[in-house]
Image: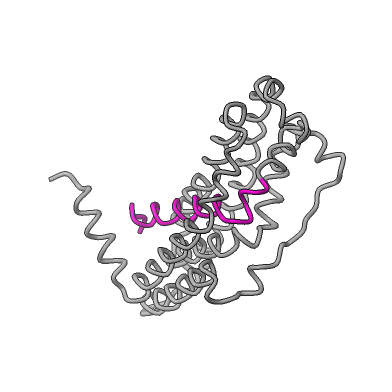
Amino acid sequence: MLSIAALAATFLAGLASFVAPCTVPLLPAYLACVSGVGAAELSQPAPRRSFRGRLLAGSLLYVAGFTTVFVVLGLSAGGLARLAQGPGTGRAVEIIGGGVIALFGLAIVGVVRIGALERVRSLGLPERLRRRGVAGAYLVGAVFGLGWTPCVGPYLAAALTLAAVSSHAATGAVLLVAYSIGLGLPFVLVALLWASLPQLPRRLTRLARPLTVAGGLMTVALGLLVATGAYSHVTSYLAQLSTPH
């Protein structure tokens, strides 16, 4: 069942992915790649203003690319869990899924190490495609979605596990849309603000570590709620509050 709590949790997971310590420093390189504007040109105030349209278009296509991949993954996670679910297995799925989410939260904080999520799946694009800027931005975003990064991996895995716990393909897809919006919206905003606030990535870097710890602890708490069965009670309560009487 889709709930406000689940949507909020996956949106926050996407937002936390954006401000992760190894994501923010790469923003200038991402923007240069998807806009076709060199890093040196982006460092100049006047050209930045003239390139604002290309920065916005490139960032939107980039976000659309990884959103497509994440939605397919969400559909798969929810659909496969639905097929595997039999009579009486729903509670077992919640316990296992909640434990997995909590484990990912501990990985985000740095308490445990999960090697599979710390490896970057490199699906590099040809140089001529990377040079196409806006024209190749969608494919660059799709490759990002397929290749992940060590920072995004635990958050994305937690969102996919929550989609699997839902046991519905459509619900899984919607949850991953929420995750993609959380990850993509700040990227688009940075592209819009780049001309006025070129030091924004540096300022965000200062907040990266505390926000990562907070996001990891919230992920652990979410996992415990799911594993103990309290999550379903919370979602039911929120559904009652949002239902007009």
Identify the image quadrant of residue 2.
bottom left
Residue nearest the viewer, comparing 229 with 26: 26
Left or right: residue 132 versus residue 161 is right
Please tell me whether residue 202 is drawn above or below residue 119 in the rendered image.
above
Q: Position of residue 170 (x, y in %)?
A: 46, 53
Please tell me whether residue 192 is drawn above or below residue 102 in the rendered image.
above
Tell me what residue is drawn at x 28 percent, y 70 percent: 230
Q: On the rendered image, what quadrant is the N terminus found in?
A: bottom left
34 inside magenta stretch: no
The stretch of residues the image draws in magenta is 1-26
- Classified by dominant secondary structure, the portion drawn in magenta counts as helix
Q: Position of residue 134 (x, y in %)?
A: 72, 32
Tell me what residue is drawn at x 44 percent, y 55 percent: 171
Residue nearest the viewer, comparing 243 with 195: 195
Residue nearest the viewer, comparing 210 with 85: 210
Identify the image quadrant of residue 47.
top right
Tell me what residue is drawn at x 62 percent, y 33 percent: 198
